[in-house]
Structure formats: structure tokens, C-alpha cells
Image: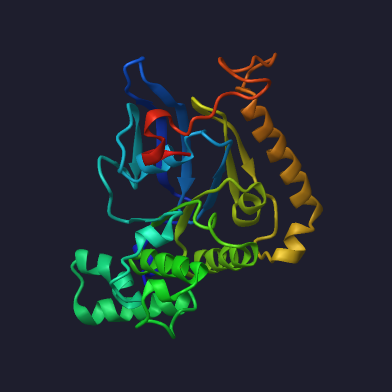
Amino acid sequence: MSTPTDRPAPGSTLLDVRALHKVYPGADGGTEAIRDLTFEVRAGEMVCIVGPSGAGKTTLLRCISGLLAPSSGQVVLEGTAISGPPKGMAVVFQEYARSLFPWLTVAQNVELPLKEKGLGKAERKRLVATALDAVGLADVPASYPWQLSGGMQQRVAIARAVAYEPHILLMDEPFAAVDAQTRADLEDLVRALWHRLGVTVLFVTHDIDESIYLGQRVLVLSGRPTVILEDVTVNLPDERDQLTTRNDPEFARLRAHIYDLVQKAKRGYRPGDDVFVPAAGARGDLPPTVGDGPYAGLAGA
């Protein structure tokens, strides 16, 4: 794995999102998914993103990963503007079953991006073994994804990202499709890997409790078109466990605060609003949520 000297200095700006704006074109003038997002992620941080359904969270991640061009604004990684998938970044998607190749073994799936990276066979073998051991799958390298449980398949996807030795790891609701017990185990795994490897993590989730448990900061997004409602600092001990941390009074306070922000976002609230005005076309007190418009299947929230 990468040594600390290979990574940016802890606390330095690693990712800089500047006035990001995204409109999906359409015959009716298009769908404005993201209005204005500006924030930084420092090297070594664990930052989570939450917001209502349809807030453009996945659109944001696709712009950051270079898979989707913004309409305006800029994403800068380690001082270089992103114009395509950058080196030093790995992504773990929600649909792990679709991100793994069923005809390749676990080890071969993890090894694949290392071949694209141009590493020699011995180095690939070492990195694959280390990554599988880190996620608790050292005993199944010859198995195929379809022979594993959902949680184990997502561990393979995480191992593949870790083996690549990224400086920043993007995770797009990676635990949404697993059961509650497996989800808790995977949350602890991500925090353990974060501590062990020193990698920077940007984690998108719908789960408020998960964002607080994992993150040092939680970026709460508004409804579409998206802006940041608040950058919430998580003042919890660095060492966390599922029982003690979730029963901490500060955890409960943060949960109530972020829940309130998300509910306001659903009703169309924007920073600086003195009086709430429902979003155009809303039914009752809820604004319309259509994923990210006509491209929801590609970049839905």
C-alpha cells in the first residue's frame, strides 16, 4: 500500500469544488440539477454528504470523478482541474453486483485496475493479497462473485479500490443494498481502512445516522437545484463503535440537527431564506423529486 510520504500532507487541500453548476439539457430548457456547490476536502479527512432524494448527490460524485462534465465551475484534485477520470482516485458504487465481473475470480477482479495501471505481476499479486486481507477476504481469492453474499461482494469492490492505492476514495451509497447487520460491519470496515491507510474519503449516503457515525464533517445538501445548506462538524471521539457512539448525547444532537436540515431541504428551504416558500410544482409541502431529471437512470440521486 502507499506509504504516508506518497500522500498529500494531512490537512492540506486535496479536493477543491468551486462554484459547481450542472444543467441537463432538454427541450423544455433543461433540468438544473446543481446550482452552486463550493467546498474543500482536506487530505486525510472523512467527509459525508447527505440530502433529500433527488438532490443531485450522485451527479456531484460523477462530476468529481470526471465521469460527467459540469456546465460551469471546476473540480480541482491536488492542484489539477479534473477533465476526466483522474489518477489517484477510486470509486465504490452502490450496485456492487454490476461493478464486479462474474466470470473473474475475486482476486482477478481486484487485480484488474492494477493491470491497467501497468504494475508488474509480483506487485499486483502483493497488492491484491494485502487488500483482500484488509477487508477480511484473504480466504476466498479463487471464488467468484456470484458465490459470495452481498456484503462479501461489496468487500471485494472495496478491496479493488483499496488495492489501487488512491489518494481519495469516493463512495456512492455503497451499503444501501445490504442488511442492517452487514451495513454496520461495513461501516466499521471503512473506518478501520481509513485509519490504517490514511486515505481521504468522500462518502455519499441517504442515512443520517451513517453519515454521523462515519464522518468528521457532514455536508447537508438542499433539494434540487442543489446548494449546501450546512457544513456540519462531527464532534465525536475519533475511536467509535456501534453501541457507544450511537448512544452518545452528541450523536443524538447531531442526528436531530441534520434531520431538521434535510426536512427543510425537502420543503424547498435555501440558506438565507427568512420565510419558507415551497418549490414550484410542489405537492403539499414537498418539492418535486425526479432524481436528476431525464438522466435520472444515469446520474440519479
Task: Please report the residue visible at 40 percent of the width from the left and 23 percent of the height from the top.
Answer: 31
As drawn, which residue projects farthest toward the bottom?
A: 139
In this view, the residue in front, 246 or 43, is 246
Q: Quadrant of residue 271?
A: top right
Q: Residue at 45% x, 74% y: name it.
A: 148
Q: Is residue 252 left or right of residue 30?
A: right
In x, y percent, where is residue 98?
37, 58
Instruction: State whether residue 85 appears in this view.
Output: yes
Total labels drawn: 0
Residue 187 picture location, percent across and down: 58, 62
The colour scheme is rainbow
**In the displayed structure image, the side of residue 14 where residue 101 appears, left or right:** left
Looking at the picture, does residue 133 appear above or below residue 278? below
Q: Say which residue appears at 47% left-offset and 64% top-offset.
A: 198
Q: Is residue 166 visible?
A: no
- In the picture, measured across the screen, residue 283 lies left or right of residue 75, that is right
Q: Is residue 86 above or below residue 63?
A: below
Near-viewer residue (272 or 275): 275
Q: Taking 173 as reference, is 285 above or below it?
A: above
Can you give x and y, in whole percent of width and height, for residue 51 in the image? 58, 37
Answer with the quarter of the image where residue 294 lies. top left
Which percent across, then down, holds residue 206? 58, 45
Which quarter of the figure is the N terminus placed in? bottom left
